[in-house]
Image (cartoon, coloured by chain):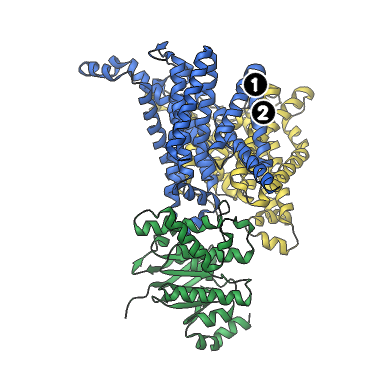
Chain colours: A green, B blue, C yellow
Amino acid sequence: MTAPLLQVSQLSKRFGGFVALDTVDFNVAEGERVGLIGPNGSGKSTLVNCICGTLHNETGSVTFGGEKVDGLIAHERTRRGLARSFQLPRPFMSMSVADNIRVPLLYTVAARVGHHVSKAEADERCMELLKMVGLDAKAAKNPRDLTQVEMRKLELARAMAAEPKLLIADESMAGLSHSEVEDIVTLLIRLNERGVTIIMIEHIMRAVMSFSQRLAVLVSGKKIADGKPDDVIKDQEVIGAYLGQ
Amino acid sequence: MRTPAFIFWQVAAAAALYLVFRHLDNDYIFFASYTVLQFIVLSTAWNILGGYCGYVNFGSAGFFALGAYSSVCLYTIGQSLEELFPESLVAPMQLIFPLPLPVLIIVAGMVAGLVGLGTGYLTLRLRGVFFAIATLALAVVLQTFIVNWSFVGGSRGAYVIPPNEIPFFGPYIQYLFVLMLVLVIISLTCARLIERSRLGYGFATIRDDELAAEACGVPTLRLKLIATVLSGALMGMAGAPFPFYIGYIEPGSAFDLSYAVNSIAMPMIGGTTSWAGPLIGAVLLGTLQQVATVTISSAINLLIVGLLLIGFVIVAPGGIVGLWQKWVSRSSKA
Amino acid sequence: MTATAIPVRQRMDIPFDLIINAVIAGLLLGGFYAAVTAGISISFGMLDIVNIAHPAFILLGSYIAYVVNVELGVDPIVVSILVLPAFYALGGFVYQVYYVSFEKYGQESLRGLAFFFGLLFVTEVCLLLIFGVDYRSVDAVYIGSSVRLGTMEFPLRLLVPCLTALAMFAGLQIFLARTFIGRAVMAVSQDPLALRLMAVDPTRIKRIAFGISIATASMAGAFLIIIQPVIPSVGRDYIGRIFAICVLGGLGSLPGTLIAALLLGIIESLTSVFYGPSWAPAVSFGILLLTLAVRPSGILGR
């Protein structure tokens, strides 16, 4: 049995007196499509931040690709193939949409490949990514001119531009229409078929159920369920957590 | 245009300027424009860290003075070889000293760059405001050290006596003027190169959203250190010829607050997103101040700079370059 | 304010009273420094506004106290209390400009800093133009005499401002901890959403807090000119001290500010005695750099 691509063991994180994450164990195998759900404030984004290095966990460890990444700063984890989109989009406002995509290409991909990515190559990959999310017409626009929905797509495309082994999509579908949600799910599945492991954090159950091969549930900083999606949603504790709030 | 062409046009413009001034045969023009050129270098240097990366440096005077005082130090060594070195070494030392100004400039750049690296390493992992405050602290600490260092004159100051004439240029001030022109070309080329390179993208992401930059794989600390070293080194290089320009240097004039204010005001008024901004700001404000100091008073002149800074920061944050860009896009839409 | 440097040879047998009195002077100065820094503890520590122009407002307070003291003979501390409302209003106005121009758009960092720096500069130059480079000082009954307890000497020109400063400081602490608005001020940067849910406008709270912060500058200015003669550039010496104390004490913690201020006062005073007063500016900035490098959250930081 091969080691999981991502191994989170006994991870805890506190903010002053508040325990955001409590000894969370979470593994993701290579090539998997995992969904992570939980009520607001359950610690999902904190978990993502700890995995990606934006925050540092007090106890427990994060292992990626067999390597302990706890001490590594965020950009080094990205370079090792761990990418994430932000729940509230954070585009670079002083550059165009295309340039936003260019940044991970220039810094993450180039560092991994070991040589400079030529301008032509970068442009090509940019447009390819923008086409995938349907933003190619707005390549030269400033993120300020995008709608909320388009900003979310940009956020996702920027994470994809880092050519990750593991992509964490943090609520990328909030506010999207029915067909747009389907488009993104199809996009992510296609990405997965190309070999990218994906963790989807979402509230839109339709999307999570159609996408995930495995589902984990986080409530008040603790993982209360982890298994086949159909089994998990029938779990009494999970139902209680969502309905009994 | 490509960089070699850019350099060529700068050199051409610089040569033309020099020849025109030389033809006018008035040393005062050289003295006055030297200050403006100095400000171009300082503003451009400040902008690399401040405008491109978004990290404010309040201690430009400190880096400038570091450059000035490293020159003073080397000059004083050259003047006191017999006291400092044993008999056997005096003769070979006399071959090396006095060091030519270009060498002093390079040394000053290295010293200032190193100090920038040290300060950056200590404080750049914190929030931008702490870096800003630390640069303020640095300038004062440096000034206190210099005030207490009698070798370079301490609070009493030091005299630096350059030769009156120099081969090829004639009056020494013209030599200084040309050296400063070279520094201007170096700093503008540097700034422009950064803007168009991967480094420029990296700097911009740091300014826009450091957290997202890290998530995209940008090594933010390393880039910030590069910016700090570059910025500090350029400021130090601008300071290196200063003792020779002014003849008598004491900590008050070297660490003068006007350097800190001007190196912030000029880029912010000119425009922080492009290499042209600091240039425009420095030329406009620098010339204005030269005129004002002579006609009104130096205090009122600084007051005007301060008011302009506040005004522009509130009303036209993009500076003159920003205003021009808006005007151009508006008239192209019409 | 402090003794001249002692030559190295004699340092070994420095009289004990000299050290004691240096420590006392340091403590008294520390109390004063706490008052000077209180404003920044609020604006920077709690509101996250980097008002590096604070020393300029203090100088403004000093000069106003000077003018009224010289013209009408009123005690400087009394003057400063009388002009408190004006300073409060000034603070509110400055915050409003800051908020409308920068905070609303999230552009605080670069432009906000440049704004306050410009303000610092303009104020200093204006004071310079009006009052010139001569040192100005005030006249009050207590300046010049001291209280003696054995070998310990408490110069009144240090003692009176220190005690008043501590009173002001205590008043601030009570206000922040016990009143609704005070607690709202402490909460505003940590949880503005919670404030909104309680139907309190965070902007209004910040404006009040910033007004208070500038009002403290009025009193700090009076203290300053009692302790030492002033010229406009004195403000810049205090920038380092203020931020050193603020960072060392832990942002947003008034008690921490007090402890850090007393510490800084003592260290500065002793440095002056052993190494000479010309090293004093380096002390505060050196401490600042050290704290930022080693423990940026300070002694009692959150």
Q: Which residue is mark 1?
A: B292
Residue type at tag 1: Ala
- Check whether the beta carbons of the residues at disc 1 and disc 2 lie within 8 A of each other: yes
- Snapshot quadrant of residue B102: top left
Compared with B53, A202 (above or below) is: below
| Image quadrant in which the C terminus of chain A is located | bottom right
Which chain does the numbered disc 2 sit on? B
Residue B293 in the image: state x and y as whole percent. Answer: 62, 20
Given residues C273 and C84, the one toward you in this image is C84
Report the disc number at residue B304.
2
- Residue visible at 61% across and 71% down in the picture: A174
Q: Position of residue B109 (x, y in %)?
A: 40, 32
When asked about the image quadrant of residue B317, the answer is top right
**Residue C129 pos. (x, y %):** 69, 23
* Residue B226 visible in image: yes
Alpha carbons under labels 1 and 2: distance apart: 9 Å
Under circle 2, the secondary element is helix
